[in-house]
Image (spheres, rainbow, N blue to C red):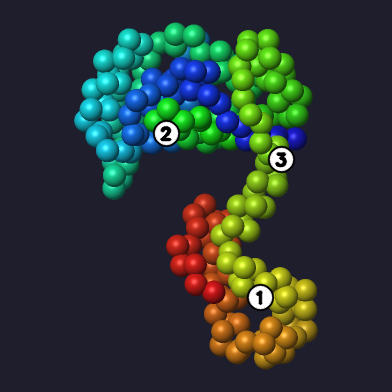
Amino acid sequence: MAVIAELTLKPSDFPLGKLLTAGMRIHIEFERIVPVGPRVVPVFWAWGDDMPEFEKRVRDGPYVNDLTELDHVDDRVLYLMDWEIPDEAFLEGLQETNGIIRTAEGYDDDDWSFELLFPSYDDLSEFHSYSLENDIEYTLGRIYTLREAGKNQLSLSLTENQREALLLALQRGYFSTPSRVTLDELAAELDISQQALSERIRRGNESLLRQTLLGSENDDKRD
């Protein structure tokens, strides 16, 4: 079963991150890192105080062949970078153990935060062994399955009141055919008006449908 591991890594153990953020007030968030033969090609978002200076510094980097702007959304710029890996044990370890960078975020000279996806716990264990053998130091956070991550993501798209209303409605049989409870009865149990409950159920259902079918969250976080 696929698992996700959260970890933090010092910039010294992640040369690619150090190349992008060292000494600058720049935020980096990787969209994906694509293996191309023995190399990897990063696609990432960047935003910060001085983007022209950031682009110049990266393009002038000793290992960078090209930096291409792919998109621009508000103050964020999406880049593709073609570079020659100098000595990137961390990325090589991921390639050897079938790991994928799900998300990665770094800022200036701070530690990098990662969500890494592995096909199984065995692959994660192999990555840990590889890291020990190659002196890659990281701090391990949560480990959970991809299925659990999906459940958590859906939960985060709901407000607490929406979740409470939907859970009660489901438990009492409101969505059954025929319904085993009325909206008035549910509202009385929650000590709110029928209209308020109706709105919570409607908005909660909309949020879940957006997340499930469209892969996006509803920005409307009202109860």
Few, some or many residues within 10 Å of mark 3 (<14, 14–19, 20+): some
Pointer 2 residue: 107
Front: mark 1 or 2: 2
Q: Earlier in the sequence, mark 1 or mark 2?
A: 2
Give x and y (percent) for residue 45. Answer: 38, 36
Q: Earlier in the sequence, mark 3 or mark 2?
A: 2
- At x 70% / y 21%, what residue is drawn? 128
Q: Nearer the viewer, residue 112 or 169?
A: 112
Pointer 3 residue: 145
Q: Which amino acid does label 3 sit on?
A: Thr
**Residue 69 falls left or right of residue 37:** left
| 212 shown above or below 12 | below
- At x 24% / y 34%, what residue is drawn? 50
Q: What residue type is labelled 1?
A: Ala
Front: mark 3 or 2: 2
Q: What residue type is labelled 2?
A: Tyr
Residue 65 in view of the camera:
yes
Q: Do the residues labelled 3 and 2 touch (CB within 8 Å)?
A: no
For the residues marked 1 and 2, what is the alpha-carbon distance in whole angstroms?
39 Å
Pointer 1 residue: 165
Give x and y (percent) for residue 76. Answer: 32, 41
Query: Which quadrant is home to the C terminus?
Result: bottom right
For the residues marked 3 and 2, what is the alpha-carbon distance in whole angstroms?
27 Å
